[in-house]
Structure formats: structure tokens, C-alpha cells
Amino acid sequence: MRFVEFLIRMLSAHAETLQALSMLLGEDVLVGLLENFPDSDDIKDIFKEPSPEQIAVFENLANPPPPPHKPERRLASPRSPYQELDWSVQELHLPALLSFYIWTYPPYRRWVESKIDLGACVTSKDSPELLGIIEQAAEDARHWTRQMPIPPQMAARVDAVVKKAWLKFRADMLKTVGQRPMQPVRL
């Protein structure tokens, strides 16, 4: 799995979260909450930069692994990881305002602004650090939501919406790396 694929899945889960929140709260209310969201400086302690151990999970493709015995055939033309990321977000068909807020998602920003090359690959699919990164992405989503000034009477429903999208993300990621998706959940 490449780093860009991890980011695409993260943004897809966040998009699913935003769409569900938009349906639950109404788009105008959601946009109002997002516009009044704490600044990056106010929440920087919650979403810290990836640790050196987390960065080491992804290997830079400057030294790619040897090709498999049977070369893969790719039907699509190669794109840059940046193009893949942009294309994937466009494929979500979000309203313009929600599309903007996809790119500003703090947990995504911390990863995309890290030292990891978007084309880097996972060094070991069974590394505890990779499993920790997957768990952390889901936990970050909950922390992000809790920073929003959600009315108390809606908090449980909002939490359920977030949990659903990110449990799906977690299961998909664990399947991708060859792990059982029904392992204990830390949510």
C-alpha cells in the first residue's frame, strides 16, 4: 500500500463523515460549525506531527523494492500521487464548500505536510506502528468532532455517525494490510 492510498482512504472517510453530518445537522449548520472551528494553533496539541517511528512505516520509493517475479500490468496511465489525491477527492462529488473542508482536515494536514513522500510504500504490513497509525486515524476523527460546538442533544447521534464512517475505514485498511478487521476496537 502506498502512502497516497492511505491519505485517499482517510479523506474518503472524512468525506463520508461530513456528508452524514450535513444530512444530520443540515449543510448550513455544518458549514457554520466548520467556519467557527478552532484555528490550527488552538488544536496543534491534539493533532501532533507523525513520530519518526510512524514516518518509518512508509519507505521512500527512491529505493523501491525489487519487482515481483510476475510484473503487474497496469491498464491506466500512470499519474502522480498528487493527481491521484486530487482526482479521488473530485470523485467524491461533494458540494464545493464541503470539498474545501476536506482539504483542511487537521489529521490529513499533519500527514500530508510530513516528510513522507506521497508515493512511499508501507515497509511492513504487519508492523505495530502501521496498525497504530490506522487506529490513530479513527481516534483523530473523534477528537476532531469533539472540537466542534455540537449541541449536547445531538452529541450522541454525531458520535454514532463519526464512528460508523471510521469503523468502515478501519476495517478496509486492516483488510488491505492483511489483518483481521474484527480485531478489538479502541473507539
Image (cartoon, grey):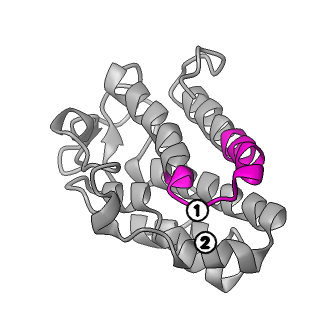
**Viewer-nearest of discs 2 and 1:** 1
| Label 1 SS | loop
Tell me if 40 is positioned left or right of 184 in this view.
left
Residue 171 in view: yes
Q: Residue furthest bottom?
A: 96
Do the CB atoms of the residues marked 2 and 1 lie less than 8 Å apart? Answer: yes
What residue is rendered at 65% in x and 77% in y? 31
Dot 2 alpha-carbon crowd within 10 angstroms: few under 14, some 14 to 19, many 20 or more: some
Q: CA distance from mark 2 to mark 1?
A: 7 Å
* Residue span colored magenta: 144-165
Check if residue 65 falls in the magenta segment: no
Task: Residue 79 in the image: state x and y as whole percent.
Answer: 46, 69
User: Which quadrant, please, contains the N terminus?
Assistant: top left
Check if residue 164 falls in the magenta segment: yes
Query: What residue does disc 2 label?
Result: 33
Dot 1 alpha-carbon crowd within 10 angstroms: few under 14, some 14 to 19, many 20 or more: few
- Prevailing secondary structure of the magenta residues: helix
Q: Amino acid at mark 1?
A: Pro
Q: Amino acid at mark 2?
A: Leu
Taking depth in this image into account, of 64 and 102 the one nearest to the observer is 102
Task: Residue 179 in the image: state x and y as whole percent.
Answer: 55, 19
Tell me if 135 is positioned left or right of 95 in this view.
left
Q: Quadrant of residue 76?
A: bottom right
Query: What residue does disc 1 label?
Result: 149
What residue is rendered at 60% in x and 27% in y? 175
Residue 118 in view: no
What residue is rendered at 19% in x and 55% in y? 115
| Label 2 SS | helix
Tell me if 126 is positioned left or right of 44 in this view.
right
